[in-house]
Amino acid sequence: MSLFVVKVPPLFPSRKRTKCYNKKRYILNLLSMKVLGAIAVILTVVGGINWGLVGIGGFAETNLNLVNLIFGSWPTVEWIVYILVGISALLVGWAHMTKKCEMKQ
């Protein structure tokens, strides 16, 4: 299974503060980017699986849209899920296009 790791530069490279301060900020920034990257990848995979099921359901003439089946009675929540999946796809695509993402095994 491959993991996506986003390279994050130091938050304030030109500021001259104590090393302890810079390390704390760098670690917090790195952890938050790893969490954000992991959430984006998970949402992108879930969105891809959902679109695959929508395509299969189109051929079978059934509704296999999982987001609609789970949140169908709350259309606003359904739209928010679609927006989050779209944003995560843009984030993952941007990370790959700008070479800020590595695939680790």
Image: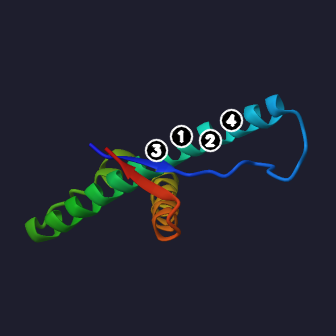
- State yes or no: discs 2 and 1 in contact (Cβ < 8 Å): no
Q: Quadrant of residue 28?
A: top right
Determine whether, in the image, residue 57 is placed left or right of residue 1: left
The residues tagged by marks 3 and 4 sit, at their Cα atoms, a distance apart of 15 Å
Say which mark, if any, is on residue 35.
1
Say which mark, if any, is on residue 30.
2
**Residue 86: % across, % down:** 47, 63
- Decide which of tag 3 and tag 2 comes sooner along the chain: 2
Say which mark, if any, is on residue 38.
3
Is disc 2 surrounded by few (<14), some (14 to 19) or many (20+) residues within 10 Å? some
- State yes or no: discs 2 and 4 in contact (Cβ < 8 Å): yes
Q: Quadrant of residue 68?
A: bottom left
At 15% from the left and 61% from the top, the residue drawn is 62
Q: Answer yes or no: is residue 72 visible.
A: no
**Of residues 104 and 97, which is closer to you in this image?**
104
The residues tagged by marks 2 and 1 sit, at their Cα atoms, a distance apart of 9 Å
Say above or below: 79 vs 35: below
The residues tagged by marks 3 and 1 sit, at their Cα atoms, a distance apart of 5 Å
Q: Which quadrant of the figure contains the C terminus?
A: top left
- State yes or no: discs 3 and 2 in contact (Cβ < 8 Å): no
- State yes or no: discs 3 and 1 in contact (Cβ < 8 Å): yes
At 79% from the left and 37% from the top, the residue drawn is 22
- State yes or no: discs 4 and 1 in contact (Cβ < 8 Å): no
Q: Which quadrant of the figure contains the N terminus?
A: top left
- Decide which of tag 2 and tag 1 comes sooner along the chain: 2
Amino acid type at circle 1 is: Val
The residues tagged by marks 2 and 4 sit, at their Cα atoms, a distance apart of 5 Å
